[in-house]
């Protein structure tokens, strides 16, 4: 793929990238959203202080902002990956995550337990959406 066919997208309503990456990249008919943790876009500080439900709510808000900047919504998400520091948080994260999708739309998904996430986050979620 020619690098000219890639669009790097970002939103001020989502936290700025904390490393050498883009919030999202459009490649053809797909949007690849970088993983989001519970950073407040205005302050850059973590939200939720270890409360995985509060963290997940912020993560989903951040993802919504990135999708919105690309002219998309959660109904266009085709794949999600959830990273958890503790798989015991699965039910709480799943409950918040499910609110972003209607009953007919269930993207493909993987959930993985990891040893650590940036900034001490308990959850990180990345998505791929289709135009």
Image (spheres, rainbow, N blue to C red):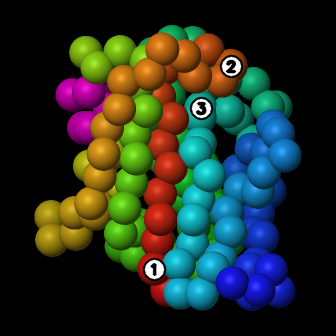
Establish if 112 lies above or below 88.
below
Span of residues in magenta? 89-95
- Viewer can see residue 103: yes
How far is disc 3 from disc 2 in space, using C-alphas?
9 Å
Dot 3: few (<14), some (14–19), or many (≥20) neighbours within 10 Å?
Answer: many
Q: What numbered label is drawn on residue 95?
A: none
Q: Is residue 14 above or below residue 31?
A: above
At x 35%, y 15%, the residue is 86
Upstream in the sequence, badge 3 or badge 1?
3
- Looking at the image, is mark 3 or mark 2 nearer the viewer? 2
Q: Which residue is mark 1?
A: 130
Q: Residue at x 21, y 28 (%)?
A: 91
Q: Where 82 sits versus 73, above or below?
A: above
Q: Kindly identify which residue carries mark 2.
A: 119
Q: Residue placed at 70% from the left, 35% from the top? A: 40
Q: Which x, y percent locates residue 95?
A: 24, 38
Label 3's element?
loop
């Amino acid at each position: 793929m020619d690098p000219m066919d890639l669009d790097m997208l970002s939103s001020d309503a989502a936290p700025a990238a904390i490393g050498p990456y883009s919030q999202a990249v459009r490649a053809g008919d797909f949007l690849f959203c970088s993983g989001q943790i519970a950073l407040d876009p205005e302050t850059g500080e973590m939200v939720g202080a270890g409360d995985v439900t509060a963290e997940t709510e912020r993560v989903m808000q951040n993802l919504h902002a990135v999708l919105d900047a690309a002219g998309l919504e959660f109904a266009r998400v085709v794949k999600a990956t959830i990273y958890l520091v503790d798989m015991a948080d699965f039910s709480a994260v799943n409950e918040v995550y499910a609110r972003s999708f209607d009953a007919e739309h269930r993207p493909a998904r993987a959930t993985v337990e990891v040893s650590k996430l940036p900034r001490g986050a308990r959850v990180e979620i990345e998505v791929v959406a289709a135009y």
